[in-house]
Image: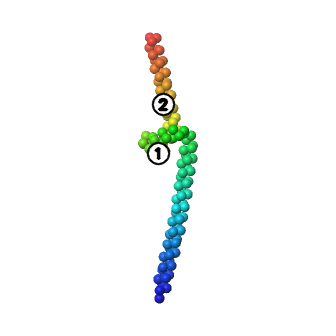
Amino acid sequence: MYERLDKLRAEVERCKKRIEDDKGKLRAAEQRLQEAENSQILADVGALNLSPEQLAEFLKLATSGQLGNPGTSNAYAVAENENVQDSKAEEDEDDYDLEGIGNEEN
């Protein structure tokens, strides 16, 4: 008389168990994904060969939106750009000195 209800209850219990098993599988897969993302981030950052100070500056620029579109700039270019700007500033100083010498001759 209650066989049908017993079968349905058993089916509900099986479904609940499968859901719990699947939740465990989901948590494990999410953890593996997080570990893989972290490994990739560490590999990408390590490939930039930046000092901790340069990395901090790069991240500050990135979070402030001063780097442009994602993927179009990299830390190496930013670090190199800073070095180029420093070199240009030194060249400008040299040019200024040369200009002064040239004007004195006239």
Residue at 48%, 80% (x, y): give it: 8
Where is 79 relative to 17, above or below?
A: above
Q: Among all residues in the image, which is located at the extreme bottom?
A: 1
Disc 1 residue crowd, few under 14, some 14–19, many 20+, Cα 10 Å: few
Question: Counting residues from the N terminus, which is met first, the one under dot 2 or under dot 1?
Answer: 1
Q: Check disc 1 and report its element: helix, strand or loop.
A: loop
Percent x, y of residue 86: 49, 29
Where is 37 relative to 52, above or below?
A: below
Q: Quarter-wise, where is residue 66 in the image?
A: top left
Q: Amino acid at mark 1?
A: Pro
Q: Amino acid at mark 2?
A: Gln
Give the residue pinned by disc 2.
85
Percent x, y of residue 40: 55, 50
Where is 105 relative to 10, above or below?
A: above
- Could you tell me if residue 16 is visible in this image? yes
What is the number of callouts on the image? 2
**Residue 70, numbered label:** 1
Q: Check disc 2 and report its element: helix, strand or loop.
A: helix
Q: Nearer the viewer, residue 27 or 79?
A: 27
Find the distance from the CA under tag 2 to the CA under tag 1.
23 Å
Percent x, y of residue 57: 48, 39
Q: Nearer the viewer, residue 94 or 55?
A: 55
Q: Among all residues in the image, which is located at the extreme front?
A: 52
- Could you tell me if residue 73 is visible in this image? no
